[in-house]
Image (spheres, rainbow, N blue to C red):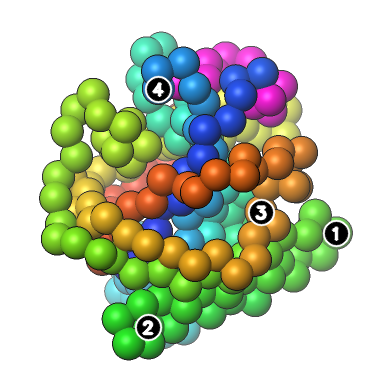
C-alpha cells in the first residue's frame, strides 16, 4: 500500500488517563515521562494482498486513526483506539484479519492550492460518533528523524498491536523506508475523535508532522 498526504497531530496526555485503555500485556511507551495520543488523517492507494493487482475503487480511500504508543517485550509499536475508512470492504477485512477497531465513515481528502482539505464523519452503525475537519500543509523541506528525538518516537514504529474479542494480544509487523517528515501547519476546524475513549485533548497546539507519501508492507498478526 501507499500512504499519501499524511498529517501526524500529537498531544501529550497523562499516563494515568491512558493506562486503563490499554490491555494487559502491553506497556505504555512514554517520552520524557509523558504518554502521547495521535490523530492521523491521510489517504491510501494500492491497498492489496501481495501478488494481487489493485482493484479499482476498492484499493484507494481516505483513512483516519487515533493512536497511542506501547511496547511488549521491549519492542515499541502502535496501539490504535480507532481507525475510520471510506471503504466498507477494507473496514470489514481489517476487523477480521487484524482485529483492529475499524469503522465506516464518510470522508474526503482534497488537495487545493498546496493544502489538504480533509473531512471525516463516522457512519458506522452503533459506533460512537467521531469527526474531523482540518486543513493542513507542509511548511518546509523533508528530513529524516533523529533517534532519541520526539519526532522519531512519534513516527518510527514498525509494528502494531491489537487484541481480539477475548483480549488476546497480537502483533502485526510493518516495513517501510524512513519517514520523509516535513514541518507542517494545520487549521483544525472541528475535532471530536478522542471523546469516544473518554480522553479530552489538552488545550495546547498539537505537535505536527507531514509526509507526502510512503510505501508500506504489512504482515498478518501473530500472538504475543
Q: Earlier in the sequence, mark 1 or mark 4?
A: 4
Task: State the extent of the magenta-drawn residues as a range.
Answer: 17-30
Q: Could you say which disc has been placed on residue 111 in the image? A: 2
Residue 26, picture quadrant = top right
Q: What residue would you read off at disc 4?
A: 31
In the displayed orientation, state which residue is furthest to the right: 126
Circle 1/circle 4 CB separation < 8 Å: no
Indicate the position of residue 15 as horizontal and vertical percent values.
Answer: 60, 20
Q: Does residue 28 show up magenta in the picture?
A: yes
Circle 1 or circle 2, nearest the eye: 2
Secondary element at tag 4:
loop
Q: Main secondary structure of the magenta part?
A: loop
Q: CA distance from mark 4 to mark 2?
A: 33 Å
Residue where numbered disc 3 is placed: 193
Q: Is residue 199 magenta?
A: no
Residue 95's place in the image compared with 103, above or below, is above
Query: Residue at image x 70%, y 41%?
Result: 200
Q: Which residue is mark 1?
A: 126
* Disc with the residue nearer the chain's start (3 vs 4): 4
Residue contact at pointers 2 and 3, CB within 8 angstroms: no
Tell me, yes or no, whether the two marked residues, 3 and 4, touch with CB atoms within 8 Å. Answer: no
- For label 1, the crowd category at 10 Å Cα-Cα, with few meaning under 14, some 14 to 19 and many 20 or more, is few
Amino acid at each position: 500500500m501507499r500512504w499519501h498526504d499524511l498529517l501526524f497531530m500529537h498531544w501529550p496526555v497523562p499516563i494515568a488517563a491512558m493506562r486503563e485503555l490499554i490491555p494487559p500485556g502491553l506497556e505504555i511507551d512514554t517520552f520524557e515521562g509523558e504518554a502521547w495520543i495521535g490523530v492521523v488523517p491521510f489517504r491510501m492507494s494500492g491497498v492489496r494482498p501481495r501478488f494481487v493487482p489493485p482493484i479499482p475503487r476498492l484499493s484507494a480511500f481516505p483513512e483516519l486513526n487515533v493512536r497511542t504508543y506501547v511496547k511488549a517485550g521491549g519492542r515499541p509499536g502502535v496501539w490504535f483506539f480507532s481507525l475510520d475508512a471510506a471503504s466498507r470492504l477494507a473496514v470489514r477485512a481489517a476487523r477480521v484479519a487484524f482485529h483492529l477497531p475499524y469503522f465506516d465513515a464518510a470522508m474526503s481528502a482534497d488537495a487545493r492550492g498546496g493544502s489538504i482539505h480533509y473531512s471525516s464523519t463516522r457512519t458506522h452503525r452503533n459506533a460512537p460518533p467521531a469527526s474531523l475537519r482540518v486543513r493542513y500543509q507542509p511548511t518546509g523541506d523533508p528530513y529524516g528523524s533523529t533517534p532519541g528525538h520526539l519526532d522519531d518516537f512519534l513516527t518510527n514504529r514498525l509494528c502494531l498491536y491489537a487484541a481480539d474479542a477475548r483480549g488476546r494480544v497480537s502483533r502485526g509487523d510493518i516495513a517501510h523506508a524512513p519517514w520523509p517528515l516535513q514541518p507542517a501547519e494545520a487549521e483544525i476546524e472541528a475535532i471530536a475523535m478522542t471523546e469516544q475513549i473518554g480522553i479530552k485533548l489538552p488545550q495546547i497546539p498539537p505537535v505536527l508532522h507531514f509526509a507526502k507519501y510512503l510505501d508500506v508492507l504489512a504482515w498478518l498478526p501473530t500472538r504475543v
